[in-house]
Structure formats: C-alpha cells, structure tokens
Image (cartoon, rainbow, N blue to C red):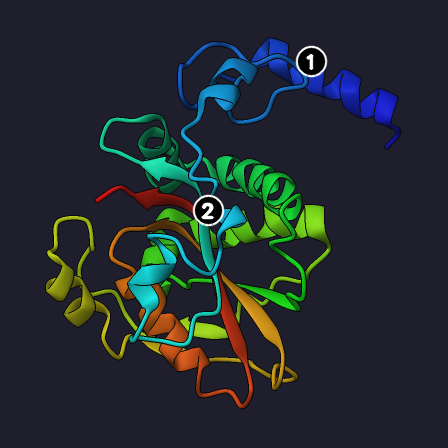
Amino acid sequence: MSMTMLSLWTRILDLISPRSCAVCGNRLSITEHAVCTSCYLHLPRTTYQFTPYDNPMTQLFWGLSTVNRAAALLFYEPHGEAAQLVYDLKYADRPDIGEDMGRMMAEEMRMAGYFDGIDAVIPVPLSPKRKRQRGYNQSEMLARGISEVTGIPVLPKALRRKHFRQSQTTLMRHQRQENVADLFILGDTNGLEGKHVLLVDDVCTTGATLTACARVLDTVPRLCVSVLTLAFTKS
C-alpha cells in the first residue's frame, strides 16, 4: 500500500473512530501517536540515559546483579502522566501505546548512544495466564517499538515466567523480591553467549522483577545485561 493510500485510510479511520491522547484525552492529529504534541513535550523525563552507569535506577541493581547500565524515559508518580500511560497500556487494551512509547524511548535514548553495543532486546515476560487475559505483553510492545527504530531484534522467548503469583503494585520492597523469586527461567537463548542484551519492562520501582530476570540471564556464559524501562518510580 502506498504512503498516500495509507494516509488516506488513516484519515478515514480517524473520522470514524477518533483517537485521543492517552494523557489529556484530547483528539490526536493525523501525525500524533499515543500522546499529543503538548503532552509529549511536558512528559517528566529522567534523562538517566546521559548517566547510565550511575543514577538512582542503576544503583538499585548494585550488589544484586551484574546489570551493566540502566535508564528509564519517564518518572512515575501516582496520578501523573506516566502513570496514566502505564495504566492504559496494561489495563485499557491499548497495545498501541506500548509500540508508540517504545519508538519514543528509542528516538530519545539513541541520541545519547544508549543502544551502542546492544545485540538483542528481551522483554520481561508475563505468565501465560496473564498474557491470555490481557491479550498481549506490554513489555513486548515496548520492545517492538524500540526495535522498529533501532533495528535491534526482539527475543520474546529468551525468558519465560512460570506463573503469576501476585501484582507487585501494593508490595513492600522485601515482599517484591520474595514475590518474584524463582519465577523466571531461561527459554530460547541460542546464540546469546557473549552478547549484550537489553532487558525491557514498563515500570521499575524497586528493581525486584528486573533483578530476578537479570540473575537468570547471568547464567548464560559471558552475557552482558542492561535495562531500559518506560518509567521509574520516584522514591
């Protein structure tokens, strides 16, 4: 399909079912995706990509795993802009938000060289039951958006989650660590020895889930693990 026909079709769909900004709810223009231009400019950036080896997020992993570098695009605060994006991505049947925000993350992070040396993107997996209920894995949607911009392949089967215990949302730090202990196992890691992978998730709060995943990936010989999330919870 030509770009002209695609644009025409998109305009027709917008007339039939107008798209709205996931943050403010205003109608999106034909060139806007997930969030309007005004909200996009005012989203609370962390800028951690410029200090990827020593920032409040990276420090969560010190002494717990061998995470190389870590960053998040946005700060997460209850009832804030990032919270609304994450909520809609996870609970409002909006996988498109994940891909759109993944592309946004990639565009901003690559200017700081954050993807230099990365060989593959691995999304934090959902349990099979939770994925069936939701219809998609929000972390995989983010990973797909990142891949579209960077060209780095996504490996959705490299990690597996055995089952779902309890949401991390209401748990304290030590409870979060216990809740995800031994939940993840290696999947298809063929060809990953000696590579550098980027572990992607929607939100990092205490780093418990990402640490659990990184520890499992650490069992692959000479594998280097870095982390990127859409949002990071302010302490």
93 to the left or right of 196: left
Q: Name the residue under label 2.
A: 48
Residue 132 is situated, as x and y percent measured from the top left of the image, at 38, 56
Q: Residues within 10 Å of mark 2 (few under 14, many from 20)?
A: many
Indicate the quadrant containing the C terminus: top left, top right, bottom left or bottom right: top left
Looking at the picture, does residue 45 appear above or below residue 29?
below
Looking at the picture, does residue 84 appear above or below residue 8?
below
Q: Residue at x 67, y 18 (%)?
A: 31
Residue 133 is situated, as x and y percent measured from the top left of the image, at 34, 51
The quadrant holding residue 180 is: bottom left
The residue mark sitting in front, 1 or 2, is: 2
Residue 137 seen in this snapshot: no
Residue 208 is situated, as x and y percent measured from the top left of the image, at 26, 64
Q: Which of marks 1 and 2 is nearer the N terminus?
A: 1
Q: Which amino acid does label 1 sit on?
A: Ile
Q: Which amino acid does label 2 sit on?
A: Tyr
Looking at the picture, does residue 202 appear above or below residue 53?
above
Q: Residue at x 50, y 35 (%)?
A: 97
Element type at marker 2? helix
The quadrant holding residue 90 is: top left
Q: Residues within 10 Å of mark 1 (few under 14, many from 20)?
A: few
Residue 31: image tag: none
16 to the left or right of 51: right
Residue 124 is situated, as x and y percent measured from the top left of the image, at 42, 62
Task: Specify the farthest residue to the bottom.
Answer: 221
Element type at marker 1? helix
Label 1, label 2: how far apart the Cα atoms are: 40 Å
Q: Which residue is drawn at 35% across and 54% down?
A: 57
Q: How many numbered marks appear?
A: 2
Closer to the camera in the image, 10 or 75: 75
Q: Name the residue under label 1.
A: 12
